[in-house]
Amino acid sequence: MEEFRRVLVSCGQGRRIERVHVADPGVLRGVTVRRLRQALEGQRLSAPKRHGKWLIAGTDDGPALLLHFGMTGQLLCASREDPHHQHDRVVLTVGGGPDNGEPRELRYRDQRKLQGFWLADTGADVDRILGDQGPDALSVDRARLAEMLAGRRRRVKAVLIDQSVLAGLGNLLGDEILWRARIDPARQASDLTADEQRRLHTTMRQVLRDSVRVGHVPTRRSWLTGRRDDPEPSCPRCSGPLRRDKVAGRSTTWCPNCQSR
DNA sequence: TCGCTTGTTGATGG
DNA sequence: GCCATCAACAAGCG
């Protein structure tokens, strides 16, 4: 999501929204096409914020646009000549920025439409729509993470990807972090030793930093994420077979050899 | 046709 | 209250 925030900064920040085109109203949540257009057209985009998986695109004098990308959403910057994609659900034409450059298009592309666009008039609206969110994963220090794990009988993976505890980690990142920290995803969160908590925090920061730098969760072969879709995946570290289980209701790939109980 | 999937929410039951 | 599981949302793939 951090990548999409950067797209919004480079493509839209400081520019005026000239036109809102909704190709598929199926991604609008609690807002009509008419209201979205009335609220946003003519507004200038201010500095966007991100919290966990949410992107908050504020405007100078109007409401904020809230975006969630679900499993398959993307935000792209395109020129008006670039051909549209079948799954471009909403297109914001922006122009008239400080440099008076060519107008361009911010395109919300999403195959599955699991999430979408919300509109928030006030800060209270933003809070209501985002719901119960923990601190952003990138902002959490070691002590804070230890607090989150303490006293929780849930499995450590369930805690990590629970947005109300820690905002920003999804299923893939959760597996990647636990694999690199050598912690079994099914361990009880409160059972982690001080050393394991430390490893979890260090690897969380590393994995997030690398993912933000690349713009998505890397699919390098040296990462678990680069192996999980193999027919018979093997561990990049010990070459042993990886296992696939359900943990916390989500498909979970892990190495029984490296991630001991 | 069925099972599966980078996410979230709400119902249900232990 | 806590926690796990399941279904639903939706679209595409094998």
Image (spheres, coloured by chain):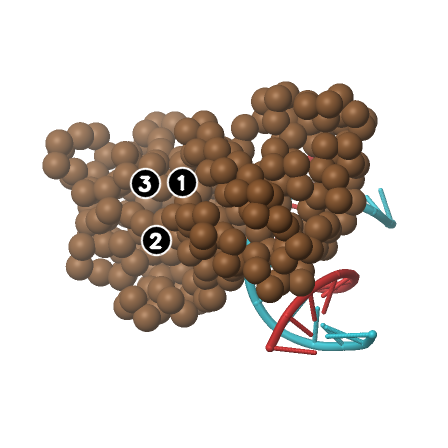
Chain colours: A brown, B cyan, C red
Q: How many marks?
A: 3
Whether callout 2 and callout 3 share a subunit is answered: yes
Query: Where residue C12 appears, x then y in whole percent?
Result: 66, 38
| Marks 2 and 3, the one that precedes in the sequence | 3
Q: Identify the image quadrant of residue A84.
A: top left
Which residue appears at 39% of the width and 27% of the height? A82
- Horizontal side of B13 relative to A140 (left or right) equals right
Q: Identify the image quadrant of residue A256.
A: top right
Labels 3, 1: front one: 1
- Horizontal side of A205 relative to B7 (left or right) equals left
Name the amino acid, label 3. Answer: Leu
Residue underneath mark 2 = A56
Residue underneath mark 1 = A2
Q: What secondary structure is marked by label 2?
A: strand
Which label belongs to residue A8?
3
Name the amino acid, label 2. Answer: Ile
The 10 Å Cα crowd at callout 3, few under 14, some 14 to 19, many 20 or more, is many
